[in-house]
Image (cartoon, rainbow, N blue to C red):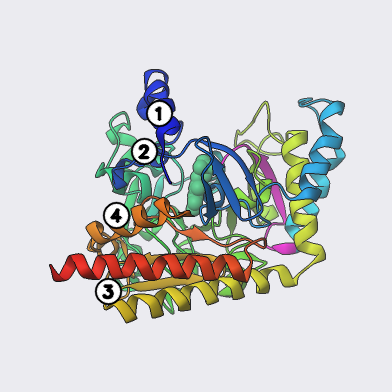
Amino acid sequence: MWTLDKSKQAFTEAKQYMPGGVNSPVRSYRSVGSTPPFISAASGSRIYDIDNNEYIDYVLSWGPMILGHAHPEVVAALQEAIPRGTSYGAPTLLETEVAKKIQAFMPSMEMMRMVNSGTEATMSAIRVARGVTGRDGIVKFIGCYHGHSDSLLVKAGSGLATFGVPDSPGVPQGVAANTITIPYNDIERVRALFKEKGHDIAGVIVEPVAGNMGCVPPLPGFLECLREETRNAGALLIFDEVMCGFRASSGGAQKYYHIDPDLTCLGKIVGGGMPMAVFGGKAEYMSQVAPSGPIYQAGTLSGNPLAMTAGLATLSILQRNPTVFKQVEAATDMLCEGLLDAAHAAGVPVQVQHVGSMFTLFFSEVPVTNFEEANACNMEQFKQFFRYNLSHGIYYAPSQFESNFMSLSHRESDIKTTLQIAKEAFCAIAQQKNM
Ligand SMILES: *Cc1c(COP(=O)(O)O)cnc(C)c1O
């Protein structure tokens, strides 16, 4: 019998100490009207809560755990590293090793800097774009999330969309005014914007596969248009691959779509589940970062030896077994096809959108290509589907505006179980609809 009794108790207590009882908003399950399971452990494709419930996990810490939880090789590397100390604030051999691995996957990363979160990576990347161009304007796309720094917390999808907060209080008007937002995939608007303001634009930041309004791939020509317009205007193209790096393909979306960005942000997978992210790109721009150049950026815990160890172990496994990406993608395809079939059979209109090992099931009759269309989904049906799954041991992201993920440790039997539960959930939704 599935209950969340202990989690409910823990949530009540946590709320006294942390806003909403959590350290990141979407974890609170507010949009699905449920109590979040408090997690006690995770292993492979499974995650366990404090009420001893077991779930097949498609959140995977919001993306990082591509190898599955607690991969033995990553755990062993960490155990071996801990006795040597947890932080030095000084250079280590590990950082160069990690940089070499990243560059092997993503040749556009000619030079890079390690930071502690995706937020820090994107914040720093736009500082570089502004610093090297001497311009202030940043273009972002509605529904793309690039972390929570002031300049980028404008029309920012996922957690914000879920809570219906368009802009956060506390972001100065003057800062937000330099961020121009236009709809994702809207080539005409991009062209018009650059015609009008091209010489004021420092850079365009984009999720080349959007994941924070649910999984929304770029339409043909969209990324090419961004590359062309930024190049002509002397602006920088920043790919925020914090989510889609190592997910869209081994070399991220830039390899998958054959686009060469000026700067790239990585996070999530790159730290193997530890707090770590990276920004980097053309040496011409990155060499202007302090101390080799005037654009300031720093971090006490940046390049932390434990984060580097987990990242290095993860990237080494991925590099050694290049078929991992194909395997994880094949498992994603299998699950997505099955979900679509099950929804069709029950007569529930859905779109199952996926790229590489990212996927979202949208309760929509038409494909979702931008935030407005994501927002038009049937949120009641999403909520019902989510709750049925959670109570039957399937752990999806608790919002229609999120991507789900596959790992190397998900077995065919996991997928079959998942599809069986999905079938039941769709039937329950169809019954409700016909009542
Ligand atoms: C998760 C994410 C971020 C923010 O990363 P944090 O580590 O949560 O700060 C930025 N951009 C994208 C595309 C993300 O998915």
Q: CA distance from mark 4 to mark 1?
A: 20 Å
Ligand 1 under 8 Å from disc 3 Cβ: no
What's the mark number on residue 348?
Answer: 3
Q: In which quadrant of the rendered view does residue 91 lie?
A: top right
Q: Which residue range is magenta in the image?
A: 105-118
Which of the two discs, 3 and 4, labels the residue nearer the N terminus? 3
Q: CA distance from mark 2 to mark 1?
A: 7 Å
Given the image, on which type of amino acid does mark 4 rest?
Answer: Lys
Q: Which residue is mark 2?
A: 35
Which of the two discs, 2 and 3, labels the residue nearer the N terminus? 2
Q: Is residue 393 left or right of residue 297?
A: left
Q: Which residue is mark 4?
A: 383
- The answer to whether the residues at label 4 and label 1 have Cβ atoms under 8 Å apart is no
The location of residue 333, given as percent across then percent down, is 53, 76
SS type, badge 3: loop
Q: CA distance from mark 2 to mark 3?
A: 26 Å
- The answer to whether the residues at label 4 and label 2 have Cβ atoms under 8 Å apart is no
Residue sitting at 76 percent across and 26 percent down? 87
Which is more toward the observer, 146 or 34? 34
Residue sitting at 67 percent across and 63 percent down? 408
Q: In the displayed image of the protein, which residue is found farthest to the left? A: 435
Which is more toward the observer, 113 or 350? 350
From what the image shows, is residue 309 above or below residue 56? Answer: above
Q: Which residue is mark 1?
A: 11
- The answer to whether the residues at label 1 and label 3 have Cβ atoms under 8 Å apart is no
From what the image shows, is residue 171 above or below residue 67? Answer: above
Which of the two discs, 4 and 1, labels the residue nearer the N terminus? 1
Residues packed near mark 1 inside 10 Å, few (<14), some (14 to 19) or many (20 plus): many
Q: CA distance from mark 1 to mark 3?
A: 34 Å
Residues packed near mark 4 inside 10 Å, few (<14), some (14 to 19) or many (20 plus): some
Report if residue 112 lies within the magenta region.
Answer: yes
